[in-house]
Image (tube, helix red, strand yellow):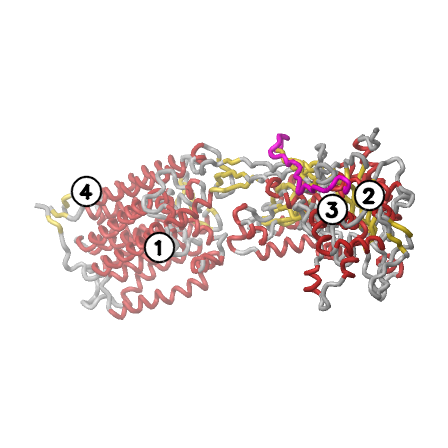
Amino acid sequence: MRRLVLSDDSEFGRKYRIAFVFVGVAFLVLIGRLAQLQIVYGAEYRELSRTNFLQKINLEAPRGLILDRHGAVLVKNRVAYNVFITPRFFNAKAFETLQNLIQIPQMDLDYIQSKIMLAEGRKRGFSLLAIRDVPKEWALILESNRDHLPGLDISTQEKRQYPNGPMAAHALGFVGEVNAEDILRQPLADYHDRDWIGKFGLESKMEKSLRGRRGSLWRVRDAKGRIKTGADAMRWLPRPFHVPAQPGYNVVSTIDADIQRAVELVMAPFVSGSAVLMEVDTGKVLAYVSKPAFDPNEVSGRLSSMRAAEIYNNPLYPMLDKVIQGTYFPGSTYKVVSVIAAIEENLVEFEEYHLCKGWYEYGRSSSFRCTHAHGLMNLESAIVSSCNVYFYMLSERVGMDRMARYARLLGFGTPPGLDLNHEKSGFIPTKQWYAQKYQEGFRIGHTLNSGIGQGDVKASILQVAQAYGAIANRGSVMEPQLVERITDYRGATVQEFMPVVKRRLEFKPETWDLLIRALDGVVNNPEGTAYKARDSHLRVAGKTGTAQVRAMRREPGQDPEESRWRNQDHAWFVGFSPVEKPQVVVVVLVEHGGFASKMSVAPAMAILDEYFKITGAQNQVTP
Amino acid sequence: MFEPEGRFYLRIDWTLMLLIISITGLGLLNLYSTSVSFSAPLFTQQIYWIFLGFSAFFITATIDYRFYDRAANLLYILGIISLVAVLVLGRMFFGSRRWLNIGPLVIQPSELMKIIIILTMAHYVNASPPKNDEGRSLKELAVPAFLVGLPALLILIQPDLGTMMIILLVFFSIMFLLKLRVRSLLTLAASALVLLPLIWTFVLQEYQKSRILVFLDPASDPTGDGWHIRQSMFAIGSGQFFGKGFMAGTQSQYQFLPAQWSDFPFAVWAEEWGFLGAVLLCSLYFVLVAWALRMAVTTRDRFASTICLGVGAMFFWHTIINMGMVMGLLPIVGVTLPLFSHGGSSMLTFMVSAGLLMSVSSRRYQL
C-alpha cells in the first residue's frame, strides 16, 4: 500500500505555517492591487488608455471670404506656416540644427528655449507653438531637414489676408485670436485656442456666417506615433470618425471696390476725416472711408506691444470708425431739421423775409453772429446762403423739443442701424435734458445753438447721410446696409438682405420741393455756399456745414502749425445727385478742414464724379 | 549509471503537471495575442523553447533527486567556472556580460546558477544537520553564506542585478525556514537590512537608482521610466473586470508597454482578460508555490525538502517582483514571470526547477 511520508522531524515543519501565511499575504496584496487598478479605478484607466491611442484631429473650416457687390475679393485667406516643437523629442542637437538652418530672430530663440525649459512632466510630450507664420522658404527648408529635427513639426494655418491693405479697413474690420473673454461669452460656440475670431467691422458683425464649422477626424496611433489604418485599428474609432469641416459662408458686401478705391484716392490728401457714399433708395453703402486708417493685415493677430501702443496712442485715432463711431456737431447740415419742422407745423411762410444784420438780437448777448450781414432772407435763400441769423429766428419759433422730434424722425439721436462697430447714436438735446444738466436750466440760447447744429447736438456722418437720403428720396429713412447677401463657398445664395425702410415720413410735398430746391441752390446758385467748389458737369444738391472745434491751447512743445490746424473747425458737405432723381447721397467730413466750401465740397464732388464715371449712370436727367 | 538506495513508488504529480501546463499555455496564448502582427518569429520561437523546456523538465524529473545531491558539488564548481568564463569570454549586450557561446549554444550561466544554488544549499543542509535542538548557530550559516556570496558577487560584476537579487532572496528564504537559533535569526535579519544601503551605495548603477527613485515618485519622470510604469498601470487598470478581450488590448497592441513580451506580459494579460484573468493567473502561481511548500514538509529528507523550498522561493519571488513591478508596487527590475514570459533562458530555468519538484514529488511514496 502506498503511503504519504510525513516527516515529523522535518526542519521546516515548524515554520511551514509562517511561510504559508507570508506567501498568502503577498498574493493577497497583489490581488488587492489588481482590484484597486481594475475595479476601483478601472473606468478612469479605461478612459486614459483610450486617449492614449485615439487622437482627435480638428479639421479647421476655412473662413468665408468678404466680397464686394460685384464679387471682387476684399478679404481672403492665405496659408501661414507655424513651427511646433515637442520638448520630449527636441534635443539640444536639433536646436542647434534649427539655428544653423534658418536665421531665427534672437527673440524667437529665447522664447523657444524658455518654452522648452518650462515644459514639465506630461507636458513635455505635447507639441508647443514655437514660431508663428514663418516665411514659406523657411518652412520648405525645415520640412526637407525633418530627419535632423526630431520633435519639430510644421503645420499650416489659414490666415486672413486683406489684399487692399487699409482700404475700407473700418468696414471690413480685422480678426484676432480668441481670448478667454470671447470663449466665456459664447461657451457653446466651440472656440479653441488660437482660433480666429472677428474683432471689428464686418469680420465681427458677420462672425457667425464667416466662421464655418470645424470638422474632426479620429485616428489610431501607436506608442511611436505611427498612424494605424487597418480594419482592426478602425474598429476603435468613434462613429462618425470623420466629420468634414464646413467652410464659412462668403459675405457679399454692398461696397463697390472700384468706387471705394476711387473714394480712398479722393480722400488721400486729408490726414483725418471720413466719407460715405450711400444709395438713396436702398441705403446700401458703396464706399466707406475713415481716416487715418489701419492695415488689417497688421492688426490681425499678434502685434508687438510697441507697435500697438503706436497705433492706439495716435492722436488721430486710426482705430476709431469715424463713419459711425465719431460724432460731431452737424453744423449747418442740421438746419434742414428746423426747416422741415417749421413748414410742417405751419410756422413759416415761404415768402416771409427777415433781415440779417450780421448778428441776432437775443437778450443782451451779441454772441449769436452770422458770417456776414446777409440782408433780407427768406426760407430758401437762408438755406442757400446758410444764414445763421435766419435760423436763430426759425429755431426759436420752432422750439427745442419740436426740433428734437423732427430730428429723431430723420434718424438723428438713434443708431442708424448698420449694427457695426458699436455705432453711436449721436445726441439730440431737449428742454428736459438742459433742465437737468444746468443749474440755471434751459435757456432760449440752447435752442438757437441747436438750430444751427452746434451746442449739444451730435451726429455721425452716417446719420447725416441717412437724413439727407430721406430728403433725396422724399420721405424714406433707409436703414444703411453693408451686407448684400451671404453665399456658400460655391456662390449659392444662403441669405439675401433686402433694403429696409426704417421710417416713412409723410410730409407735405411742398416741404420736399422747397428743401430740394434750396439744397440745389446751395450748389448751383452763385449765392450758394458750395457754388465755388461745385462741379458744373454734375447735378448735385447738398449742404455745407462747419462743426466748431473747442479752442485748445497750444501744448508746450507742440508745433505751432499743428496747433493752428487743430483749432480749425471740421468741414462738412452732404450732397445727393442727380437732383431730379437722386441715386446716391455722399457725406464728406474733413477734420480741421476749416470752411466747408473750401475743403469738403470739392472731394464730395470728386466722389460723385467717380461714382457716375464708374457706374456709367446718367447724372443729367433729360426732361 | 546509478542505483537508487531505495525503491520508490513512482507516481506522477498531476497537480504540479497541470499547473505547469496551464501557466505555460496561458503564456503562449498571451504571446500570440501581441506577436501575430509582428514580423519577428516570437511565437514560433517560444513554441520551440517550450518544447525544449518540457524535454528538460521530463529529463530532470525522471532522474532520482538523490542523484542531484551527489552531483551538487561538481555542478557548483562548473557553475562558478562558467560565471568566471562569462566575465572573460562573454559577449557584451546592452552594457552587461551575461551570455556565453558554447558551440552553437548561447547560454546564460547566471540563470543556471539559480538552480545550482538551490542544489548546493540542499546538499549543504542535508549534509550538515543542526548540531543541537535549539537550531543552527551563526557559525553553521557561514559556509552556505560563502557558497552563495561568491556566485552572487560574480553575477553582480556582469552586472545582472535581477538575478543576483533572486539568488540572495532564495538564499535568505531557505535560511529563514531552517531550524535556527533565535540569535542567528535576528543576525540574519539584521544583515539583510545592512545589505540594503550597501547595495544602494556600491552596487546600484545610476540608472537603477533613478528607477527606484522614479518608482517612489512616478511623477518625477513621467516620460522616462515613470512613463513605462504609468503605461503598464493604464493597461492593467483599463482591463477592468472582464478585460478588453483576446487580441483587443490597445495598450499592448499599439506597443505602449515596454518589453511587453519578456518583462510586462502580465500587463498584456491583465488588460485583455481583466480582473478575472489576472486573479486566475495569480491563483495558479499561488497554488504552485503553496504546493512546493507543502511538498517541503511532506518529503522524506532534508535534501528534497530544501529543493522544494528553494524552487518554491524562486517561483514566489519571481512572480511577486514581476507582478509588483508591472502594477507599480515595486521598482522596475528585469525579472521575468515564471513560465509565462517570452524567452529561452527563463523558460529553461523554470522548467528544470519544476522538473526538480516533480522528481521529488513523484518519489514521495514508498513501496
Per the image, the residue denoted by label 3 is A344
Tell me which numbered mark, 4 or 1, is placed earlier along the sequence.
4
Distance between the Cα atoms at labels 4 and 1? 29 Å
Name the image quarter holding the C terminus of chain A: top right
Q: Residue furthest left?
A: A1
Q: Residues within 10 Å of mark 1 (few under 14, many from 20)?
A: many
Tag 3's secondary structure?
helix
Kind of residue at disc 2: Gly
Bounds of the magenta span? A488-511
Q: Quadrant of the N terminus of chain A?
A: top left
Residue A94 relative to residue A267: left or right: left
Task: Assign a secondary structure to mark 2.
Answer: strand
Image depth: mark 2 or mark 4 in front: 2
Separation of residues labelled 3 and 2 (CA atoms): 21 Å
Chain under numbered label 2: A
The disc numbered 4 marks a residue on which chain?
B
Residue that numbered label 4 is attached to = B12
Extreme residue toward the bottom, this view: B183
Q: Is A341 on the left or on the right of A159, as rendered?
A: right
Q: Amino acid at mark 3?
A: Glu
Does the magenta run of residues contain A391? Answer: no
In the rendered image, residue A583, in percent from the top left (x then y), is placed at 77, 35
Q: Which residue is mark 2?
A: A542
Chain letter for mark 1, please. B
Tag nearer the camera, 3 or 4: 3
Residue at left 84%, top 39%?
A: A540
Q: Answer yes or no: is residue B347 visible.
A: no
Q: Which residue is mark 1?
A: B166
The number of numbered badges drawn on the structure is: 4
Res A417 → quadrant: top right
Residue B107 in picture, x, y percent from top left: 39, 44
Disc 4 element: loop
